[in-house]
């Protein structure tokens, strides 16, 4: 299973998306058919419109047939005889004309060709009425149809262009086109009823509520007035609909800060009052339409509201994207600078060591110069008995290097008996060697510190690079949600210093708010989480509360689909008080589960210090958002310089994204990790080095997709001394639900199975994924 990767199972929504993608042409064909039908159903002051003809002219060449078929079907329903014949003939002739021109030639025609075709079709649709009576009204009707068809076609073409661009950076004209096209569709829906309820008026109220929820007072008022005008043109009752929808949208925007219920309630009360005052007694259809729209609004998926917000407030996302790019560029420049400092420092250090070389080991020359120069026997020793003297000194230096001291009795007898200053000579030799060894130790320590410092530069560069990736993960800010958040916190008297809502690339919402420290006593975390979940239309986790310089920072995230249940068990070596293994298990921001295990060298107190330092520092850095690669670099440097003694510890990390089930395994000299995935056992192994032994240590990494019911078991070296096959089998066949019980069984079994006569600390960690 090492380094294997699999895809997480698809949910129902994903399967539907895949199904839609595989049948995309068929769905587009039916959408064109439905759009043609709805636009052909449109009315203005009770008269049929040429919106269906505009759709036939504006659609792409490939969709001419379904759009024309839908328009012809729409014109067959609810029109007068003359209108039915005229519109049917016009739609048919327009479709035949577009198909006859051909797709390639149609694309090459100027932009005004489609509006001209729509206008021509409108003229054709009016010929029957003019031929029958030829009154001024008939001529005026023809002109109005021509204008509506041409202008409607132009606006439909504009919306198509905006859609191809992803509705980014819409100008004033594009917004007008989108509003007019929405009114055209709603006017067609208004002719479709379910009992006394008009689908068009219900859709119009729903759009007003969405605009009020997303854009506040301004969006609600503008959408309400626009919807009122659209329904007024359809029915002729301008005053009622403009007043009811406009005022209702305004008040819905005012109360949008209270969540969906506030916006829907404000509109329903306003609309109901105006309808009861102005409508004839017994007329319930407006009340039923408002009720249906508010119910639909309350059950509308939050994802649709977020898409509406992205559409209605595109500038905010672009602005936050620009700021994000600036910050990411600054971080990238800093990363490059720190990385360059690390590389240059290492290169210069290496070159200087090559040039200077290691200091030569001490010989007898300086001692001879100091002791023998004024000795009365120097001529005898260094001229007549030179060979004996050189041999004696050579053996003294060799013994000094081997044992760190010189035993006079071990020297050659002729040299020992003839040298009258032997104690002074040997003392000087030992003094010189002691100075040499001290210098060598200092040089090694300086080299070690220099390596640690350059490693820290590299670690800081990796840390900032991780921050750069985190900034890039922020998809866009959410200004509307941010405004609601600030208003809510102010209403709760929490005096927010700042507050922000943003989404990541997985379209998950993050909420951060900073309040003064003295307001912490007013925090009711449970109530705050529930109310913000309702306010922002997201199911939020309990916040992470951090304190910094007299301020409290609250971080909320969307509730993940998975939860992690941890278990652990330890057995110390020989019953000692201190265990050489240390571990941490925790969940950051409710979205990422972490298991960290460190095994110090040996057992007892020294090993406990090393492992506790490694596990504790890495956990603290991970909780602060530092990625594991840079965290290991920084911790490795800390282990290198924390004391003069050798210090090392294995580091084993498992990180699980609770949204996707993606598990990442990081190992530095660690034992295998055991998995049970889909009911089958396996392991993740590595051959990397532990932290603290060399500079530039790195994790060996692998990833795997996990599902609910899968589990991860992490081990220290003491567990797998007799192999891992039995552990894999035991984990695979375990049928319990308590992870602590599994950890205890594995630890006790490992202690009993060990047969090499040695003992070691035993630690077992477990994580089970659940929905």
Image (cartoon, helix red, strand yellow):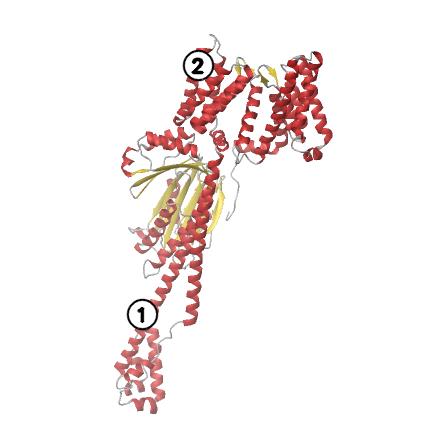
Total numbered labels: 2
Outermost residue on the top side: it is 281
Q: Which mark is residue 274?
A: 2
The answer to whether any part of residue 147 appears in the image is yes
What residue do we see at 31% from left, 91% from top?
380
Instruction: Please indicate whether residue 382 sits to the left or right of residue 629 in the image.
Output: left
Quarter of the image where one finds residue 38? top right
Tell me which numbered mark, 2 or 1, is placed earlier along the sequence: 2
* Mark 1 neighbour class, 10 Å CA radius: few under 14, some 14 to 19, many 20 or more: few
Q: Position of residue 530 (x, y in %)?
A: 37, 29
Residue shown at 46% from the left, 17% from the top: 244
User: Considering only vertical position in the picture, is 585 above or below 425?
Assistant: above
**Front one among 139 and 567:** 139
Query: Does 529 sit left or right of 304 as displayed?
Result: left
Q: Residue furthest front?
A: 136
Of 94 and 675, nearer the camera is: 94
Secondary element under disc 2, as helix, strand or loop, is helix
Residue at 68%, 21% in the rendered image: 123
Residue 744 place in picture, x, y as percent: 37, 43
Dot in front, 2 or 1: 2
Residue at disc 1, secondary structure: helix
* Quadrant in which the C terminus is drawn: top left
Examine the rendering and report whether any part of residue 732 can be seen: no
- Label for residue 7? none
Vertical relation: 103 (above or below) 682:
above
Q: CA distance from mark 2 to mark 1?
A: 96 Å
Q: Position of residue 409 (x, y in %)?
A: 29, 80
Per the rendering, the mark at residue 438 is 1
Q: Which of the 4 image quarters holds residue 528?
A: top left
């Amino acid at each position: 299973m090492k380094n294997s990767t699999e895809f997480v199972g698809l949910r129902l929504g994903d399967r539907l998306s895949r199904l839609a993608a595989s049948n995309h042409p068929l769905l587009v064909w039916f959408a064109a058919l439905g759009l043609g039908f709805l636009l052909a159903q449109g009315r203005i002051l009770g008269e049929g419109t040429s919106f269906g003809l505009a759709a036939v002219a504006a659609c792409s060449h490939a969709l001419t047939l379904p759009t024309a078929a839908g328009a012809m079907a729409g014109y067959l329903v609810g029109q007068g005889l003359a209108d039915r014949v005229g519109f049917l003939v016009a739609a048919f002739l327009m479709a035949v004309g577009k198909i006859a021109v051909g797709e390639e030639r149609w694309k090459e025609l100027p932009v005004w060709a489609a509006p001209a075709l729509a206008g021509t079709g409108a003229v054709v649709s009016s010929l029957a009425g003019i031929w029958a009576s030829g009154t001024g009204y008939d001529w005026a009707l023809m002109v109005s149809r021509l204008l509506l068809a041409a202008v409607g076609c132009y606006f439909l073409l504009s919306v198509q262009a905006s859609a191809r661009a992803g509705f980014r950076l819409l100008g004033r004209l594009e917004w007008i086109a989108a509003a007019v096209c929405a009114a055209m569709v709603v006017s067609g829906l208004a002719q479709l009823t379910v009992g006394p309820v008009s689908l068009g008026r219900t859709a119009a109220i729903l759009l007003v509520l969405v605009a009020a929820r997303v854009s506040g007072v301004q969006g609600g008022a503008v959408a309400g007035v626009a919807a009122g005008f659209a329904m007024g043109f359809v029915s002729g009752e301008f005053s009622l609909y403009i007043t009811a929808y406009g005022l209702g949208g305004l008040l819905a925007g005012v109360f949008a800060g209270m969540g969906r219920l506030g916006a829907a309630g404000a509109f329903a009360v306003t609309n109901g009052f105006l309808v009861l005052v102005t409508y004839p007694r017994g007329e319930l259809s407006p009340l039923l339409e408002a009720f249906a729209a508010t119910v639909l609004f309350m059950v509308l998926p939050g994802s649709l509201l977020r898409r509406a917000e992205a559409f209605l407030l595109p500038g905010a996302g672009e602005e936050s994207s620009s700021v994000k790019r600036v910050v990411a560029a600054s971080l990238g420049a800093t990363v490059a600078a720190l990385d360059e400092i690390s590389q240059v420092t290492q290169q210069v250090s290496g070159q200087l060591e090559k040039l200077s070389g290691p200091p030569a080991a001490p010989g007898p020359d300086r001692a001879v110069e100091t002791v023998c120069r004024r000795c009365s026997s120097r001529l005898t020793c260094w001229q007549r008995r030179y060979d004996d003297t050189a041999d004696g000194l050579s053996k003294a230096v060799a013994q000094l290097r081997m044992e760190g001291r010189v035993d006079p009795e071990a020297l050659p007898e002729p040299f020992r008996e003839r040298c009258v200053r032997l104690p002074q000579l040997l003392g000087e030799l030992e003094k010189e060697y002691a100075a040499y060894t001290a210098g060598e130790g200092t040089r090694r320590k300086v080299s070690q510190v220099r390596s640690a410092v350059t490693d820290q530069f590299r670690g800081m560069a990796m840390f900032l690079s991780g921050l750069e990736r985190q900034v890039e993960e922020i998809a866009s800010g959410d200004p509307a949600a941010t405004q609601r958040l600030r208003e809510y916190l102010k209403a709760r008297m929490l005096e927010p210093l700042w507050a922000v809502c943003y989404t990541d690339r997985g379209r998950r919402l993050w909420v951060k708010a900073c309040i003064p420290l003295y307001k912490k006593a007013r925090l009711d975390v449970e109530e705050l989480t529930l109310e913000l979940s309702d306010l922002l239309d997201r199911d939020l986790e309990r916040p992470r509360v951090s304190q910094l310089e007299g301020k409290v920072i609250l971080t909320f995230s969307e509730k993940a689909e998975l939860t992690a249940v941890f278990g652990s068990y330890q057995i110390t070596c020989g019953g000692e008080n201190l265990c050489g293994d240390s571990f941490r298990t925790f969940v950051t921001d409710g979205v990422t589960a972490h298991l960290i295990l460190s095994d110090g060298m040996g057992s007892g107190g020294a090993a406990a210090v090393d492992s506790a330092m490694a596990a504790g520092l890495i956990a603290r850095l991970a909780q602060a958002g530092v990625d594991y690669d840079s965290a290991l670099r920084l911790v490795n440097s800390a282990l290198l310089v924390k004391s003069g003694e050798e210090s090392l510890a294995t580091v084993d990390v498992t990180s699980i994204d609770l949204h996707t089930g993606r598990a990442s395994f990081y190992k530095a000299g660690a034992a295998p990790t055991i998995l049970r995935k889909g009911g089958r056992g396996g392991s993740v192994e590595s051959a990397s080095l532990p932290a603290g032994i060399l500079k530039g240590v790195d994790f060996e990494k692998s990833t795997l997709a996990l599902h609910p019911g899968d589990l991860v078991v992490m081990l220290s070296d003491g567990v797998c001394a007799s192999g891992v096959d039995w552990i894999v089998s035991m984990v695979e066949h375990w049928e319990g639900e308590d992870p602590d019980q599994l950890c205890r069984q594995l630890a006790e079994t490992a202690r009993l199975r060990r047969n090499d006569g040695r003992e070691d600390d035993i630690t077992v960690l477990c994580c089970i994924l659940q929905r």
